[in-house]
Amino acid sequence: MTKRDSRTPVYGIAVAAQLVDLPEATLRLFESKGLLTPARSEGGTRRYSDDDIDRLRRAARLRSDGINIVGIARVLELQDENQSLRDAADGR
């Protein structure tokens, strides 16, 4: 069996919301504030990947720690930068 790429969009918004234990409205809010950009089907339906789910979980943790949306966006950006630097150092 082939392992699915973590970037493959497979989850609809209802399933994604369940997986991260957040209301669908929060996922829409995070998207509107630029915290993530889920893929869209040809019909315009949001499709979330495993990477999106991970990002939503990180955003939810930061939010529960009392960080506002602007702060969450900055922390996620820095985390992504840090990971890119690690990947580059590891030759990925």
Image: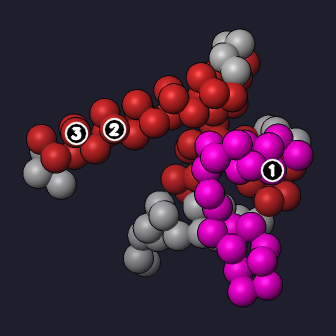
Front position in the image: 70 or 1 = 70
Q: For the residue marked with disc 2, what is the amino acid?
A: Glu
Image side of residue 45 versus residue 62, left or right: right
| Residue range of the region highlighted in magenta in the rendering | 25-47
SS type, badge 2: helix
Q: Residue 81 carries which label?
A: 2
Residue that numbered label 1 is attached to = 28
Q: In which quarter of the image is residue 73?
A: top right
Label 2 close to label 3 by CB (< 8 Å): yes
Q: Which of marks 2 and 1 is nearer the N terminus?
A: 1
Residue at (22, 39) in percent of width and height? 85
Specify how the rendered protein is coloured.
Answer: secondary structure
- Mark 2 vs mark 1, CA separation in Å: 24 Å
Q: How dense is the environment of label 1, judged by Cα within 10 Å: few (below 14), some, or many (20 and up)?
A: some
Residue that numbered label 3 is attached to = 85
Residue at (63, 69) in percent of width and height? 39
Residue at (74, 54) in percent of width and height? 16
Which percent across, then down, holds residue 34?
64, 46
| Residue 19 visible to an observer of this rendering | no
Residue at (80, 59) in percent of width and height? 13
Q: Which of marks 3 and 1 is nearer the N terminus?
A: 1
| Residue 69 visible to an observer of this rendering | yes
Q: For the residue marked with disc 1, what is the amino acid?
A: Arg
Image side of residue 6 versus residue 16, left or right: left
SS type, badge 1: helix
